[in-house]
């Protein structure tokens, strides 16, 4: 089956319903040639499943194909950013953090506080594609277990790195801090060629129009308002 993911015509054959269902809205029946072919063996899925915090073969298949896709597109001026992505006013904003910090909790505060102004297009694994100064964020079929994996895209306005704190504050990080944080939210254990491509992506991203912030926050509604006022109504 062929899918259009982040504007890449991608071919793969999911075995389990989890990825099949998530991929349905990405099905592509156009005339463009396949750009990416993904294949993940049953043995790799089984080995990976044993290392998962909560073993679940169908979800591990989704995770495995996500990793394969990400490692491929890194060499094509694109990359996955572990984040909860929202669209507000026609622009995309990615809220990135380590698992358990509360990125999804924060974006749900936006839904609660700002209603129809905002929606989540992918709650864990959106992909960004860099084209000079312009960067586009795309939804993917890889949801991280949330079920939110919409086939949508929008110009990327900002990436916000979330840190847990008792009191809410926000600041613009240095380039060094941005690269460090991006590294931990993209891909790990890649070969030398892919690692160099990833570093090139970071450099291109820093030269783009995308803004970066670090939001140190609690999980109260005031955190969403601080972020909204600082990032959107600046």
Image (cartoon, rainbow, N blue to C red):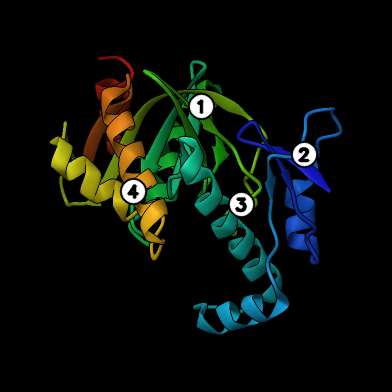
Q: Which of the two labelled residues, at mark 1 and mark 3, occupies the earlier sequence position?
A: 1
Residue at the spot x=64%, y=75% of the render?
A: 45
Which label belongs to residue 196? 4
Which label belongs to residue 234? none
| Most foreground residue, 146 or 5 | 5
Q: Nearer the viewer, mark 4 or mark 1?
A: 4
| Most foreground residue, 168 or 16 | 16
Which label belongs to residue 87? 1
> How far is disc 1 from disc 3 in space, using C-alphas?
18 Å
In which image quadrant can residue 121 be found? top right
> How far is disc 2 from disc 3 in space, using C-alphas?
12 Å
Could you say whether the residue bearing mark 4 is in a helix, strand or loop? helix
The residue where tag 2 is placed is: 25
Query: How far across and down, in percent of the image, does residue 57 sit?
Result: 68, 75
Which label belongs to residue 142? 3
| Most foreground residue, 217 or 172 | 172
Query: How far across and down, in percent of the image, does residue 61 sit?
Result: 67, 67
Q: Which of the two labelled residues, at mark 2 and mark 4, occupies the earlier sequence position?
A: 2
């Amino acid at each position: 089956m062929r899918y259009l993911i982040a504007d890449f015509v991608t071919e793969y054959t999911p075995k389990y319903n989890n990825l099949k269902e998530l991929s349905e809205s990405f099905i592509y029946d156009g005339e463009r040639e396949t750009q990416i072919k993904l294949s993940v063996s049953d043995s790799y899925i089984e080995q990976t499943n044993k290392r998962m915090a909560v073993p679940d073969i169908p979800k591990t298949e989704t995770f495995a194909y996500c990793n394969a896709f990400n490692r491929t597109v890194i060499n094509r001026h694109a990359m996955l950013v572990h984040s909860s992505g929202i669209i507000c006013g026609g622009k995309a904003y990615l809220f990135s953090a380590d698992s358990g910090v509360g990125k999804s909790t924060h974006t749900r505060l936006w839904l609660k506080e700002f209603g129809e102004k905002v929606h989540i297009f992918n709650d864990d694994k959106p992909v960004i594609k860099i084209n000079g100064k312009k960067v586009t964020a795309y939804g993917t079929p890889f949801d991280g277990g949330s079920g939110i994996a919409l086939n949508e895209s929008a110009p990327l306005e900002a990436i916000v790195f979330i840190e847990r704190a008792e009191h809410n504050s926000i600041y613009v990080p240095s380039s060094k801090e941005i690269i460090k944080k991006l590294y931990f939210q993209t891909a790990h254990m890649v070969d030398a060629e892919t690692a160099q491509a990833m570093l090139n992506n970071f450099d291109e991203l820093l030269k783009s129009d995308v803004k970066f912030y670090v939001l140190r926050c609690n999980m109260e509604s005031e955190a969403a308002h601080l972020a909204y006022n600082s990032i959107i109504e600046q």
